Image (cartoon, rainbow, N blue to C red):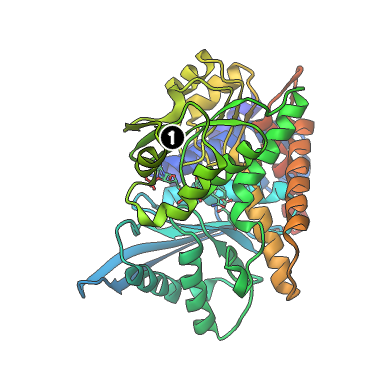
């Protein structure tokens, strides 16, 4: 009862402050409901009001990005950096360039990132940023000029020990290169102020692969806990970007049968099981095709379904790896009806609140992104360490580090998520991260 009243008071306060930020409120509600019982029994947490304070970002930076397009016209976009929490390390999290980007989406991402980063056990705070700029269909010169204009504003707020951005949707190696080049010239310093860089200028082995590979390493832990294996499992994956393709690659290497990929235009289904060679082809060819999945269908056969999603394809394992709220309650019910046994999020908050409820009510092993996709940011943190020491670590060492970190996150979820013989991974992840953040907040005073 006390918990209900506290929940209502906190959420009403946030709804009144931020009435137009549904994604942010969704992410906050999901965590608050799980951590309230822990908060309630710690007098020091209550005295320092750690829960309310952890819900709101420390700082939201909002700026205009103005630049010339190829037609010599001025374009104006919005740019943001949400520095949610610097409690346990420099602010850390990706940059997203997508027309849907707004304050609500970046605030939810920065909030989730704070909890995710705490789970890694590494010294990184939480942040996220980006712009409503749509890079699709732009020339290379336009992308470069946009990145330079974006960094002209952002550079004063970031730095190797302050805030370290990285990539996210539509921000890959090319964009990171342009952003880093602009940062270096504006600051006259070569330092690890951005991660996801190319190997030649301070990047790390395994960073490109880390989110997708880490997801599959986490999946291996979940399977082992349920006395199960990857061999022959039918896997459906959404997305066809960095996370989806690397998850598919590792799943195939471990004898999984990957049946789908998707993008904002539809779903590609290949019932015989997508091969590693097909994934390699998609990675190489992506920049040369307007729609890489339609091109894949033309190259290798299979089916292309415009406007479709992967969740109607019968499977054992579902890995949503595209974007937030892409899998709703109806999709969740269809997955269950068709025999899906495991759901692990590669994207950030891809399952709606109602879809999560369907999985949790069915006591399915359902793993939230903040646990299962933490491999990317973990490798970014290892890139920061390498930059700080002007050293480079070998691929094999870093891949083993990634496995160890994912295993450690899995253990934390299992320890905190016990629920009458079932593991509530979501609650486990939320509580484990909350304990770390709340203790740091108390220790650092008001
Ligand atoms: N990159 C990383 O290291 C990490 C990424 N993540 C999360 O993983 C997810 C994917 O990121 P990433 O792979 O890096 O991004 P990419 O830009 O490489 O790929 C994104 C993929 O998702 C698809 N997509 C984007 N928006 C939608 C939509 N509204 N509906 C359907 N499909 C969509 C894109 O299709 P299209 O090309 O048609 O737009 C594309 O195939 C995001 O949620 C991101 O926050 C989480 C942890 C780390
Ligand atoms: O590597 C990073 O710093 C950020 C990765 C990211 O954006 C995420 O985990 O969602």
Which residue carries the number 1 mark? 326
Relative depth, front residue between 13 and 287: 287
Q: How many marks?
A: 1
Q: Quadrant of residue 9?
A: top right
From the viewer's perspective, tell me whether residue 168 is left or right of residue 429: left
Left or right position of 23 against 253:
left
Please say if 219 is above or below 109: above
At 51% from the left and 13% from the top, the residue drawn is: 337
Please tell me whether mark 1 sits on a helix, a strand or a loop.
loop
Residue in view at x 36 percent, y 70 percent: 146
Q: Quadrant of the N terminus?
A: top right
Label 1 Cα crowd, 10 Å radius (few <14 / some 14-19 / many 20+): some
Is residue 145 or residue 156 the one in the foreground? 145
The residue closer to the viewer here, 296 or 124, is 296
| Above-or-below relation of 176 to 14 | below
Give percent across and percent down for residue 191. 63, 77
The answer to whether mark 1 is within 8 Å of ligand 1 is: yes
The quadrant of the image that shows the C terminus is: bottom right
The image shows residue 4 at horizontal and vertical percentages of 60, 26
Q: Residue at x 36, y 49 (%)?
A: 100
Residue 349: % across, % down: 52, 39
In the depicted view, which residue is nearer to us: 276 or 140?
A: 276
Q: Residue furthest bottom?
A: 188
Q: Is residue 384 above or below residue 290?
A: below
Residue 366 is at least partly visible in this image: yes
Q: Eyeballing the image, is 380 above or below 300?
A: below
At which x and y percent is residue 272? 50, 27
Q: Is residue 6 visible?
A: no
Extreme residue in the top direction: 337
* Residue drawn 61% across the image and 20% down it: 341
Left or right: residue 247 versus residue 220 is: left
């Amino acid at each position: 009862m006390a918990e209900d009243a506290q929940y209502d008071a906190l959420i009403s306060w946030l709804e009144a402050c931020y009435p137009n930020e549904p994604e942010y409120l969704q992410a906050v509600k999901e965590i608050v409901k799980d951590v309230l019982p822990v908060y309630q029994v710690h007098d020091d947490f209550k005295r320092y009001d750690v829960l309310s304070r952890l819900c709101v970002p420390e700082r939201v930076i909002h700026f205009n990005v103005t630049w010339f397009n190829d037609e010599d016209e001025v374009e104006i976009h919005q740019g943001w950096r949400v520095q949610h929490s610097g409690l346990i390390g420099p602010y850390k999290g990706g940059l997203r360039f997508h027309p849907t980007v707004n304050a609500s989406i970046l605030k939810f991402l920065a909030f989730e990132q704070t909890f995710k980063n705490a789970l890694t056990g590494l010294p990184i705070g939480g942040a996220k940023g980006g712009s409503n700029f749509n890079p699709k269909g732009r020339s290379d010169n336009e992308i470069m000029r946009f990145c330079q204009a974006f960094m002209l504003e952002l550079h004063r707020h970031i730095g190797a020990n302050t805030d370290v951005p990285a990539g996210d949707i539509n921000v890959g190696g090319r964009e990171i290169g342009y952003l880093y080049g602009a940062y270096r010239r504006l600051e006259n310093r070569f330092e690890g102020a951005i991660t996801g860089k190319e190997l030649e200028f301070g990047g790390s082995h395994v960073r490109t692969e880390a989110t997708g590979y880490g997801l599959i390493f986490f999946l291996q832990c979940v399977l082992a806990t349920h006395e199960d294996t990857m061999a022959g499992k039918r896997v459906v994956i959404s997305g066809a970007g960095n996370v989806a393709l690397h998850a598919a690659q590792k799943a195939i290497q471990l004898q999984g049968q990957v049946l789908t990929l998707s993008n904002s235009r539809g779903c590609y289904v290949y019932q015989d099981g997508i091969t590693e060679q097909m994934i390699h082809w998609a990675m190489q060819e992506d920049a040369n095709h307007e729609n890489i999945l339609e091109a894949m269908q033309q190259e290798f056969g299979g089916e292309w379904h415009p406007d479709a999603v992967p969740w109607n394809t019968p499977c054992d394992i579902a890995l949503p790896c595209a974007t937030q709220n892409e899998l709703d309650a109806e999709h969740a019910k269809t997955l269950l009806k068709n025999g899906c046994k495991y759901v692990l999020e590669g994207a950030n908050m891809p399952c709606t609140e109602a879809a999560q409820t369907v999985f949790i009510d069915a006591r399915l092993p359902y793993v939230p992104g903040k646990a299962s996709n933490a491999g990317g940011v973990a490798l970014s943190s290892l890139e920061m360490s390498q930059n700080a020491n002007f050293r480079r670590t070998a691929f094999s060492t870093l891949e083993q580090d990634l496995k160890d970190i994912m295993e450690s996150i899995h253990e934390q979820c299992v320890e905190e998520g016990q629920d009458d013989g079932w593991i509530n991974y979501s609650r486990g992840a939320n509580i484990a991260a909350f304990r770390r953040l709340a203790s740091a907040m108390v220790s650092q005073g008001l």
